Image (cartoon, grey):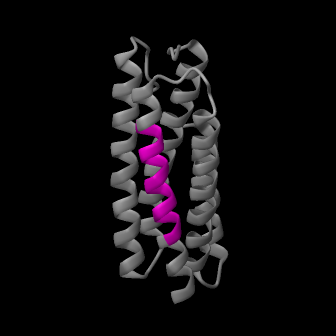
């Protein structure tokens, strides 16, 4: 039987935290690129990750669990690294884009890790699979920008 365990709750809260981090990271990326198309893409991604976080928060709450409300220290460190990298890079757009690609790949791995949990309720599994698919599609899109630079 698929149930919502403390382990699932912990993993979902980690995903929630990562989505908050991604939302903030994409907002930060908007400030560090010049290309208007990249700015629009990062704005869309920030909004999308905010929506993902809200959906995860709702899912967690539906199982009477507390949802984390913030991002992680590692996320803050990553944003500082993005700022430094773009400051010292000769091509800021390319440096930020590389970090976005790295972040999307990491997100897919994190979603796969949670999806491998055998005790996932059907609603949770469906939500995570949908979010992961969107990240995969966007990863392909962000790679297109790489070829444009």
Residue 69 included in the magenta stretch of the image: no
Magenta span: predominant SS is helix
Q: Position of residue 73 (x, y in %)?
A: 61, 38
Looking at the image, which residue is at 47% across and 43% down? 129
Residue 128 included in the magenta stretch of the image: yes
Foreground pick, 64 / 124? 124
Magenta residues (range): 127-140
Looking at the image, which residue is at 46% across and 63% down? 137
Rendered view: 148 above or below 77: below
If the image is split into quadrants, where does the C terminus sit? bottom right
Q: Position of residue 147 (x, y in %)?
A: 56, 86
Farthest-out residue, front: 1
Q: Is residue 64 visible?
A: yes
- Choose top left, top right, bottom left or bottom right for residue 64: top left
Left or right of 78, for residue 70: left
Left or right of 77, for residue 3: left
Foreground pick, 16 / 69? 16
Farthest-out residue, bottom: 148
């Amino acid at each position: 039987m698929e149930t919502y365990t403390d382990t699932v709750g912990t993993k979902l809260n980690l995903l929630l935290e990562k989505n908050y981090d991604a939302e903030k990271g994409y907002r930060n990326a908007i400030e560090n690129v010049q290309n208007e198309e990249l700015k629009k893409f990062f704005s869309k991604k920030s909004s999308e990750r905010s929506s993902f976080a809200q959906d995860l928060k709702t899912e967690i709450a539906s199982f009477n669990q507390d949802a984390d409300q913030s991002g992680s220290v590692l996320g803050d460190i990553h944003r500082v690294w993005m700022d430094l990298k773009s400051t010292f890079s000769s091509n800021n757009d390319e440096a930020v884009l590389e970090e976005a690609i790295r972040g999307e790949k990491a997100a897919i791995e994190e979603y796969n890790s949670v999806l491998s949990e055998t005790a996932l309720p059907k609603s949770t599994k469906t939500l995570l699979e949908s979010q992961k698919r969107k990240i995969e599609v966007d990863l392909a899109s962000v790679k297109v920008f790489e070829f444009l630079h």
